[in-house]
Image (spheres, grey):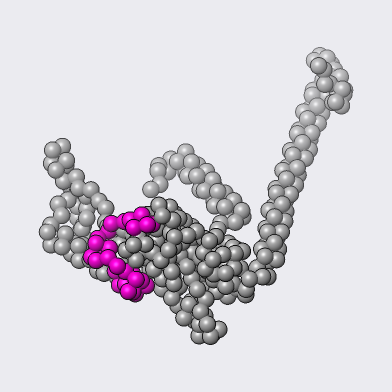
């Protein structure tokens, strides 16, 4: 199929021997250059328009979602906050995000209770401790300001272990599914030792430090008994902090012995018998039957579309700069 009728017909070129041939060629090149510039500007404007429409769509979606949430929060409800994934400073279950959501829930009107829906294997003891402390602080402040309690309930989903259980014990009550995994009250530190492998390979380790223990836990050096005992002491101290938090939160409800604090974990049914949880249930059933406000409103702080787009854009730009730097002879950046 011939699509030439879509194009503007160009003036015929003179023969190469014609005196006007060079002038006509220059004019033709200039004209084609101008046309290329016009096409570039046209596509650039289209691309800018598409970006604008995309951003306006995101803004409209965000505003409509906020308006809908505003309508829902105008009546009594249960605030839902999800603690999902590894508890780390830069993760979705980091203290900053969870605490920000907790503060919003405690400040909001028409909130009858807060449900922490936990599905996490644990993580940073520092982040977990921050959240535990903030739950207690917010509860005390709310009671002082309002004259009554705002109940907080933790609900274990698939797993509520280690640092996740550290958070849960700050709640008034803990609920789980009969098959949930609960517990793992302990502290661990992972590492590897390649000292013998280095010897077998005939590789000499040259580690220079200022400070007798600065190279502690170096995987290619031996671990002296004194350093091993020191590290064990640190772990024991962290473990005792964890045990204290559990005993403070659970009190006389705990029915087990020292095995509770050995790092073991149990099913929801077993945890109920040991006093690690108070009952079996889900976030919905707790909101309906315990809080008395069946409507669940999610207060969880999540990355919005703008933030996710900025993260992806920042990563792409950084990777592009890294490739340019490498091509210019800069080597690799670590």
Is 228 part of what is drawn in magenta?
A: no
| The one of 101 and 202 positioned closer to us in this rendering | 101
Residue 175 on image: x %, y %: 44, 62
Question: Residue 89 occupies which quadrant of the picture?
Answer: bottom left
Residue 17 versus residue 146 in the image, above or below:
above
Q: Nearer the viewer, residue 231 or 115?
A: 115
Magenta residues (range): 243-270
Report the quarter where the N terminus lies.
Answer: top right
Q: Quadrant of residue 299?
A: bottom right
In the image, taking residue 18 as reference, residue 129 lies left or right, namely: left
What residue lies at 40% left-to-right and 52% top-to-bottom? 179
Is residue 244 magenta-colored? yes
Question: Residue 6 appears in which quarter of the rendering?
Answer: top right
For residue 15, side relative to residue 311 (left or right)? right
The overriding secondary structure of the stretch rendered in magenta is helix
Q: Is residue 130 visible?
A: no
Q: Position of residue 207 (x, y in %)?
A: 19, 52
Q: Position of residue 138 (x, y in %)?
A: 48, 76
Pinpoint residue 176: horizontal percent, then vertical percent. 43, 59
247 vs 64: above or below: below
Please give the name of the residue rendered at 31% of the width and 56% of the height, measured from the top-left corner. Answer: 265
Q: Is residue 40 left or right of residue 220?
A: right
* Figure disc tally: 0
């Amino acid at each position: 199929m011939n699509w030439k009728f879509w194009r503007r017909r160009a003036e015929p070129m003179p023969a190469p021997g014609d005196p006007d041939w060079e002038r006509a060629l220059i004019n033709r090149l200039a004209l084609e250059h101008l046309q290329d510039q016009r096409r570039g500007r046209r596509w650039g404007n289209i691309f800018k328009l598409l970006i604008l429409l995309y951003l306006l769509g995101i803004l409209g979606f965000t505003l409509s979602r906020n308006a809908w949430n505003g309508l829902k929060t105008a009546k009594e409800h249960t605030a839902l906050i999800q603690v999902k994934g590894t508890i780390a400073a830069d993760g979705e279950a980091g203290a900053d995000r969870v605490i920000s959501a907790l503060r919003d829930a405690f400040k909001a009107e028409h909130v009858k209770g807060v449900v922490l829906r936990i599905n996490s294997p644990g993580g940073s003891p520092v982040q977990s401790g921050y959240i535990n402390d903030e739950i207690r602080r917010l509860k005390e402040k709310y009671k002082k300001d309002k004259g009554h309690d705002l109940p907080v309930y933790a609900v274990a989903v698939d797993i509520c272990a280690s640092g996740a259980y550290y958070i849960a014990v700050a709640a008034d009550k803990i609920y789980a599914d009969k098959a949930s995994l609960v517990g793992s009250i302990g502290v661990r530190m992972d590492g590897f030792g390649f000292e013998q492998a280095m010897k077998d390979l005939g590789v000499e380790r040259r580690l220079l430090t200022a400070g007798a223990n600065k190279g502690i836990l170096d995987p290619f050096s031996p671990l002296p008994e004194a350093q091993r005992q020191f590290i064990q002491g640190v772990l024991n101290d962290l473990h005792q902090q964890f045990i204290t938090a559990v005993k403070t939160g659970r009190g006389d409800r705990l029915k087990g012995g020292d095995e509770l604090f050995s790092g073991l974990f149990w099913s929801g049914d077993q945890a109920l018998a040991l006093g690690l949880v108070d009952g079996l249930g889900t976030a919905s059933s707790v909101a309906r039957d315990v809080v008395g406000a069946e409507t669940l409103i999610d207060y969880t702080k999540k990355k919005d579309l703008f933030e996710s787009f900025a993260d992806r854009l920042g990563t792409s730009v950084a990777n592009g700069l890294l490739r340019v730097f490498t091509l210019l002879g800069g080597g690799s950046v670590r």
